[in-house]
C-alpha cells in the first residue's frame, strides 16, 4: 500500500538531516586543484626527451662529442647520453623532440639588471616619479622580454623585491629566475638619491628615504648598517640597463666580441655567473641534476657569440625549469599557461 502525506514528510526531513545545506554532495575533481592555498602554482611539467642535439659546454668551451640525447624530467636535466638512445614513448612516457643537429645551450645569466627601471619614460628623473603600482605592471613586461631573449636567471642590483621574485618562481609572472638585492643604498647626492636637488633637502627625515623604484638614502655607518639590515630582513638575496635600454640587453655580446673571444664571453654569462651567484651545477650548465634552463639555437655561440644578440634570427626555443617559454621548434609546444 502507498504511504500517506506523513510518510512523505518524514522522508523529506530525513534527507534534510543528511544534507544540511543545498548543492552537490561532492566537489568536482576538476575544481579541487583550484581550492588550494595557492591555486596558481602549477604541477610539475611533462618530461621531454631531446634527441640529435649538439650540446654546448661553456665551462670547457667545447661541444659534447657527437649528437646527444638530453632527458628533462621534473624541471631538471635527468641525463645526457651520446647517440640516439631508446627513446620510445612507452619507455619514457615523455614527449620526444628531434632537434636534428641544432644546438642546446645553457640559459643565459645576467648579474646586473634593474627590472624596476621600467620603460614608458624618457629619463631617469621621470622614472623615479612613476607610481609604484605602475612600476609593478611594467616590470612584468621587462621580465617577460628578458626571458624571451634567452636570459633564464638575472640578478637585480637595486629595485626588485622578494615578493616579485616569489611571484616569478610561483608562475604568477613570466620571467627569468630573479636574484634580488632589495633597494640600492646610497649616500645623499649619490647614485641612489633621487630626491629633488634643492637647498634644505627633501624632507625625508634623519634616517634616509626611499625612491619608488631603485634606491634609498643612508648617510654614515649607522644608517648604512640599518638600511642593509632592513633590506636583508625584507628578503634581499645579496649585498645597467635602465628604462627603454633593456631592449639592448643582448647587444653586450656584440660589444664584448670586439675585444674578447666568443668562448670567454659565453663563459661570462653562464659558468662564471653561476659561480658568482653560488649556484654552480644548478644553472649555466647542461648536466644531470641542473635546472632545465635551455636555449635551442640554429648556430654555435662558441664560434660566434653575437648570434645571441640576434635572437630573432637564431633563437629557436627557450626553456626555464622544464617549461617552454617560446618555441619555433617542430613538435615543441609553448607551455599552455605561458
Image (tube, rainbow, N blue to C red):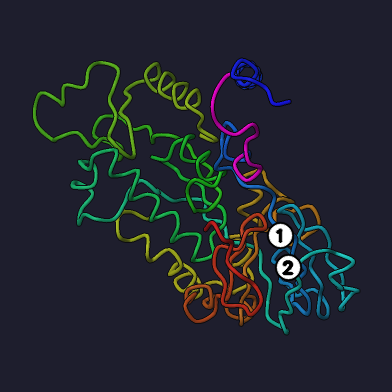
Secondary structure found at label 2: strand
Vertical comparison of 55 with 217: above or below: below
What residue span does the magenta drawing correspond to? Answer: 20-31
**Residue drawn at point x = 25 percent, y = 15 percent:** 206
Residue 212 higher or lower than 99, as above or below: above
* Contact? badges 1 and 2 (CB < 8 Å): yes
Which of 227/293 is in front? 293
Most frequent secondary structure within the magenta stretch: loop
Q: Position of residue 215 (x, y in %)?
A: 33, 35
Outermost residue to the left: 199
Q: Secondary structure at mark 1?
A: loop
Q: Reading the chain from its start, which is encountered first: label 1 or label 2?
A: 2
Rounded to the nearest whole Å, what is the CA distance between mark 1 and mark 2?
7 Å
What is the quadrant of residue 29 in the picture? top right
The spot of residue 64 in percent (x, y) is 80, 73
- Give the labeled residue for mark 1: 285
Residue 57: image tag = 2
Task: Please provide percent x and percent y for residue 259.
Answer: 50, 73
Viewer-side residue, 332 vs 248 = 332
Q: Which residue in the rendered view is the most extreme toward the bottom?
A: 100
Instruction: Please state which of residues 183 and 192 is positioned toward the viewer in this rendering.
Output: 183
**Is residue 196 on the magenta stretch?**
no
Mark carried by residue 47:
none
Amino acid at each position: 500500500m502507498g504511504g500517506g502525506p506523513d510518510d512523505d514528510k518524514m522522508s523529506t526531513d530525513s534527507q534534510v538531516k543528511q544534507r544540511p545545506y543545498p548543492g552537490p554532495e561532492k566537489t568536482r575533481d576538476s575544481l579541487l586543484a583550484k581550492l588550494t592555498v595557492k591555486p596558481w602554482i602549477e604541477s610539475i611539467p611533462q618530461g621531454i626527451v631531446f634527441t640529435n642535439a649538439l650540446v654546448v659546454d661553456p665551462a670547457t668551451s667545447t661541444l659534447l662529442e657527437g649528437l646527444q640525447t638530453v632527458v628533462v624530467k621534473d624541471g631538471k636535466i635527468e641525463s645526457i647520453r651520446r647517440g640516439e638512445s631508446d627513446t620510445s614513448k612507452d619507455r619514457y612516457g615523455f614527449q620526444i623532440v628531434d632537434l636534428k643537429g641544432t644546438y642546446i645551450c645553457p640559459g643565459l645569466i645576467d648579474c646586473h639588471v634593474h627590472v624596476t627601471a621600467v620603460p614608458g619614460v624618457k629619463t631617469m628623473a621621470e622614472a623615479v616619479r612613476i607610481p609604484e603600482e605602475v612600476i609593478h605592471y611594467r616590470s612584468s613586461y621587462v621580465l617577460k622580454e628578458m626571458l624571451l631573449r634567452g636570459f633564464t636567471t638575472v640578478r637585480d642590483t637595486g629595485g626588485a623585491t622578494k615578493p616579485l621574485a616569489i611571484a616569478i618562481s610561483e608562475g604568477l609572472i613570466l620571467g627569468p629566475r630573479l636574484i634580488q638585492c632589495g633597494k640600492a643604498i646610497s649616500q645623499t647626492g649619490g647614485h641612489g638619491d633621487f630626491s629633488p636637488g634643492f637647498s634644505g633637502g627633501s624632507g625625508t627625515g634623519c634616517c634616509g628615504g626611499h625612491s619608488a623604484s631603485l634606491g634609498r638614502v643612508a648617510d654614515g655607518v649607522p644608517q648604512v648598517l640599518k638600511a642593509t639590515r632592513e633590506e636583508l630582513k625584507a628578503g634581499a638575496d645579496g649585498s645597467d640597463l635602465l628604462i627603454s635600454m633593456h631592449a639592448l640587453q643582448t647587444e653586450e655580446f656584440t660589444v664584448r666580441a670586439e675585444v674578447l673571444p666568443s668562448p670567454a664571453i659565453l663563459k661570462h654569462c653562464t659558468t662564471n655567473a653561476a659561480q658568482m651567484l653560488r649556484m654552480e651545477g644548478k644553472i649555466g650548465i647542461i648536466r644531470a641534476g641542473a635546472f632545465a634552463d635551455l636555449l635551442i639555437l640554429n648556430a654555435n655561440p662558441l664560434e660566434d657569440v653575437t648570434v645571441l644578440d640576434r635572437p630573432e634570427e637564431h633563437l629557436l626555443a627557450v626553456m626555464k625549469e622544464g617549461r617552454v617559454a617560446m618555441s619555433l621548434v617542430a613538435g615543441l609546444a609553448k607551455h599552455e599557461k605561458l
